[in-house]
Amino acid sequence: MSGVGGAVGMIGAARCAKGVTVGALFALAACVQPEPAPQKVVKAPPVPSDFTTTYAEAQSALAVVKGCPGAFKFNEAGFETAWASLRRKYVLGGKVPAWDNQASYEEAAQKTVEMVYGDFLGRYNYQAHRPFDWCRAGKTEIAERTAIGKYLIPR
């Protein structure tokens, strides 16, 4: 009996790979995979807002540099200084904060996109059907000494 049951299971497995054509219930049962148990969704701890804001400001400045080629250079030293200051503020004594993980950073990246495309482009009345004047935006950010402007160096 165990030999027959084993044969049915093996046949069922072979048929699953090719697609079940003849319907022995035992063979078909070998094809059915149990549903995984639902997993509890754990919300990632949020990345502090000053991290997200600093990153969004830098991304906005990089968008200006890319959108207005040759007119601006990204202030890497300024960004590195700001980033190092934030790391010192939150990573004390080598202890890694709970939010320092991939899920938290993915959530922060989404917020960054919203900040760049919502706040920054919204200030300049950006409309998708019109060409955007990245050069004007960059000059304005520098002239008004904004947080984004501090990451832009005119050439």
Image (cartoon, rainbow, N blue to C red):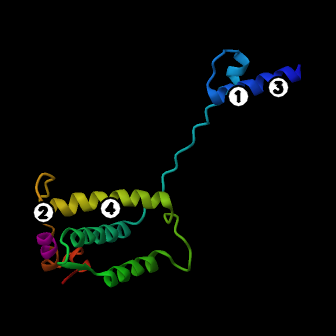
Q: Which residue is mark 4?
A: 112
Q: Nearer the viewer, residue 129 or 148?
A: 129
Q: What kind of residue is marked 3?
A: Gly
Determine the residue positioned at 82% across, 22% down.
5
Q: What kind of residue is marked 2?
A: Tyr
Determine the residue positioned at 21% across, 61% down.
119
**Magenta stretch encompasses residue 138:** yes
Determine the residue positioned at 12% across, 74% down.
140
Q: Is label 3 in a helix, a strand or a loop? A: helix
Q: Which residue is mark 1?
A: 14
Considering the whole magenta stretch, tell me its main secondary structure. Answer: helix
- Mark nearer the viewer, 2 or 1: 1
- Sequence-earlier tag: 1 or 4: 1
Query: Disc 1 and disc 4: Cα gap in Å?
Result: 50 Å
Residue 124 numbered mark, or none: 2
Q: Position of residue 71 (x, y in %)?
A: 17, 78
Q: Are marks 3 and 2 in contact (CB under 8 Å)?
A: no
- Sequence-earlier tag: 1 or 3: 3
Q: Nearer the viewer, residue 138 or 131?
A: 131
Say if residue 47 shows up in the picture.
Answer: yes
- Mark nearer the viewer, 1 or 3: 1
Say if residue 45 shows up in the picture.
Answer: no
- Sequence-earlier tag: 3 or 2: 3
On the rendered structure, is 124 left or right of 52?
Answer: left
Q: Which residues are magenta?
A: 135-140
Q: Which residue is mark 3?
A: 6
